Amino acid sequence: MHLPSFLWLWRIAAWSMGFSLFAYLLLAASGSWLFLSRRHSQPRPKWLRPAHYMVGSLMVTLVVLLMVIGLVGTLGYYGTLGHSAHLPAGLLVVALTLLSAWSSTQISPKRPWARSLHIGTNLALFLGFTTVTLTGWTIVQKYLP
């Protein structure tokens, strides 16, 4: 694949990563609010759960966009994949994000395991985002003059 410059692609990736991390923080806050209101049998605002789902959907979209940009950009620039630990870290984040999204749709009184899976996956996602951020920073340094 021959593209004149990948700078535009890396800019989209940088913004997407920033928005993904912001969405993750919003999800952590709204998820904690949902969890605590449920745990203490307190009413919660009607908008909270739909907002949590919307932000989660946005984060899934951004993470998949990041994967596509990373694959296209790396293949276009190098012609192959697997030049750093960023690829397995990124694929792990995509897998955890998709598992979290799927498990959220399974949460119900009949499936108590789904809530635990969702929360556990999101805790693991914190480590995944940390790793992908650190490995991504080394990738960014290759492209900066």
Image (cartoon, rainbow, N blue to C red):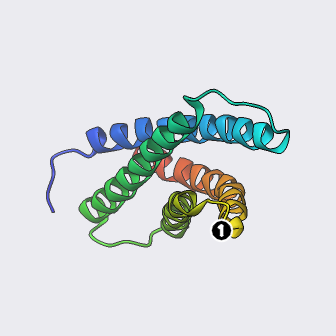
Q: For the point 69% across and 35% down, which residue is it?
A: 29
Q: Residue at the spot x=61%, y=34% of the render?
A: 26
Q: Is residue 101 left or right of residue 11?
A: right
Please indicate whether residue 64 sits to the left or right of residue 3 in the image.
right
Q: Residues within 10 Å of mark 1 (few under 14, many from 20)?
A: few
Is residue 74 positioned above or below 25 on the image? below
Q: Can residue 119 be seen in this view?
A: yes
As drawn, the residue found furthest toward the right would be 40
Name the residue beneath numbered marker 1: 111
Q: Nearer the viewer, residue 1 or 46?
A: 46
Image position of 51 with respect to 107: above or below? above
**Of 91 and 33, the residue lying toward us:** 33
Instruction: Give the camera-side residue of 145 and 57.
Output: 57
Q: Where is residue 36 in the image (x, y as percent from the top left)?
A: 80, 39
Image: 103 above or below 9:
below
Q: Horizontal and vertical percent for residue 121?
A: 66, 62
In the rendered view of the protein, which quadrant contains the C terminus? top left
Secondary element under disc 1, as helix, strand or loop, is loop
- Identity of the residue drawn at 72% across and 35% down: 33
Q: Viewer-proximal residue, 18 or 110?
A: 110
Find residue 82 and report its horizontal and vertical position in percent.
Answer: 44, 73
The amino acid marked with disc number 1 is Arg
